[in-house]
Amino acid sequence: MDKLVALCKRRGIVFPSSEIYGGLGSTFDYGPLGTELKRNVKEAWWRSTVQERADVVGLDSAILLHPRTWAASGHLASFADPMVDCKGCKQRFRADDAGGPRCPRCGGELTEARSFNLMFKTFMGPVEDTAATVYLRPETAQGIFLDFAEVVDTQRAKLPFGVAQIGKAFRNEITPGNFIFRTREFEQMELEFFVRPDPQEEARWFEHWVNARFEWYVRYGISRERLRLRPHAQSELAHYSRGTTDIEYRYPFGWGELEGVAKRGSFDLDRHSEFSGRDLSYFDEATRQRYRPWVIEPSAGVDRSILAFLLDAYAEDVVEDEKRVVLRLDPRLAPVKVGVFPLLRKAGQPEKAHAVFDLLKRRCMVVFDAAGSIGRRYRRQDEVGTPFGVTIDHETMQDDTVTLRYRDSTKQDRVAIAALPARIDELIGWED
């Protein structure tokens, strides 16, 4: 993990936020390359969850929701962790993270556990003491439930159907840590999939989404051996859950949740109907019945997914008797797809390289690099996961072909410039 964290900071992937002021606990900024990686992960999720399906639509709901939302959802009453403080070093821990009656840092005595609500509170209005108390949303799901009737009416949605959303969420975690695994500000990729209130229908779609989400991670390069499914015991289910299975990844610090797939039943629609007084039922034209659908919810963390993709891609090997660090990211996720390099800074090669750069840049993210030896330039791009390198050399100036280099194998081909865009498209695998 330490090597990856150092690489992320050194190469502008992820680094601590507000660092010039000493940082702010467990908050991170995504640099230029990290921004591209994050965008690619979200687009890959959106493509498989929304674009490739006919039964899912998208939504982008507000971060600030009416405060009664969180009373109805149960977050005000139930969204809390047991917290303990060390009487010696004054550090604060989740009770389950402390692992015993003594402080895991200094061995000092711990206080009795007490409840700690995880929601960030703020105020809406000009004067704090008279303003309404509102909360930064701790999950994106509730916006989907609040808009359920609008989506059904405007999209003429028929069961089964889903509503997908990617957005920021905020949790005042007691003990955040492990880089971007657990942070107070994070991004979620969530789907609420509505089905008929029938146990067999629920079981069928639950199995479908558990398998589909597991295979998505494999599809984009994570080793099956580092993934597992873990059903929740009854005692650990969330207050809304009728059953949950986690997709876990074997991080350096152990197995950790990558994504959860939960059976939410009609809990949320029931509660919001009760608290708002609005009818959030669904009229089934086939049966001529009105009911509140049950919900299957796959909920993934963008940041945790990025961490898993980076960890699984990180490798060290030896090329031409020199140690190299390489990120073997799936080309579809890689921040930059192609590096373009003139072998020399003369003889018309830089101008030709810029022409190749212009040819490719409308199709994918491309970088131009003319600094240092060609080997050093290859290593720089290997380190940030760029899957392909295009070198303009002496032969290029004679026959309009280039050297195409492959990150993982370091093998090289000659490709005509005219055929290069189609070749790059094929190698990236956009059609998959």
Image (cartoon, rainbow, N blue to C red):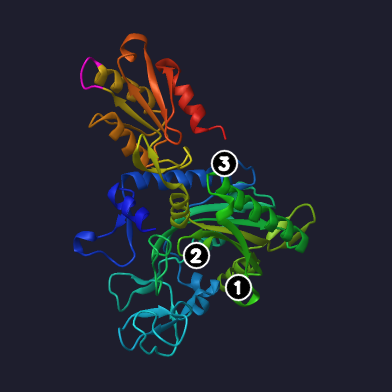
Report, in whole angstroms, how far the alpha carbon at label 3 lies from the one at label 1. 31 Å
- Residue at coordinates 50% horizontally, 75% vertically from top-left? 79
Residues packed near mark 1 inside 10 Å, few (<14), some (14 to 19) or many (20 plus): some
Residue lying farthest to the front in this orientation: 321
- Residue at coordinates 80% horizontally, 56% vertically from top-left? 287
Q: Is residue 357 visible?
A: yes
Residues packed near mark 2 inside 10 Å, few (<14), some (14 to 19) or many (20 plus): few
Magenta stretch, residue numbers = 344-348
Q: Tell me where residue 332 appears, x and y as whole percent.
A: 48, 38
Q: Nearer the viewer, residue 139 or 308?
A: 308
Quadrant (top left/top right/bottom left/bottom right) for the N terminus? bottom left
Residues packed near mark 3 inside 10 Å, few (<14), some (14 to 19) or many (20 plus): some
Residue 345 shown in magenta: yes
Callout 2, which amino acid?
Gly
Q: Is residue 61 visible?
A: no
Q: Which residue is mark 2?
A: 254
| Position above or below: 144 against 233 | above
Callout 3, which amino acid?
Gln
Report, in whole angstroms, how far the alpha carbon at label 2 lies from the one at label 3. 34 Å
Mark 2 or 3, nearer chain start: 3
Task: Determine contact: label 3, label 1, CB under 8 Å.
Answer: no
Task: Determine contact: label 2, label 3, CB under 8 Å.
Answer: no
Tell me, for residue 237, which label it has, or none. 1
Q: Tell me where residue 241 appears, x and y as whole percent.
A: 62, 70
Nearest-to-viewer mark from 3 and 1: 1
Tell me, for residue 51, which label it has, or none. 3
- Residue at coordinates 31% horizontally, 67% vertically from top-left? 25
Label 3, secondary structure: give it.
helix
Q: How many marks?
A: 3
The quarter holding residue 170 reads: bottom left
Q: Is residue 395 left or right of residue 414?
A: left
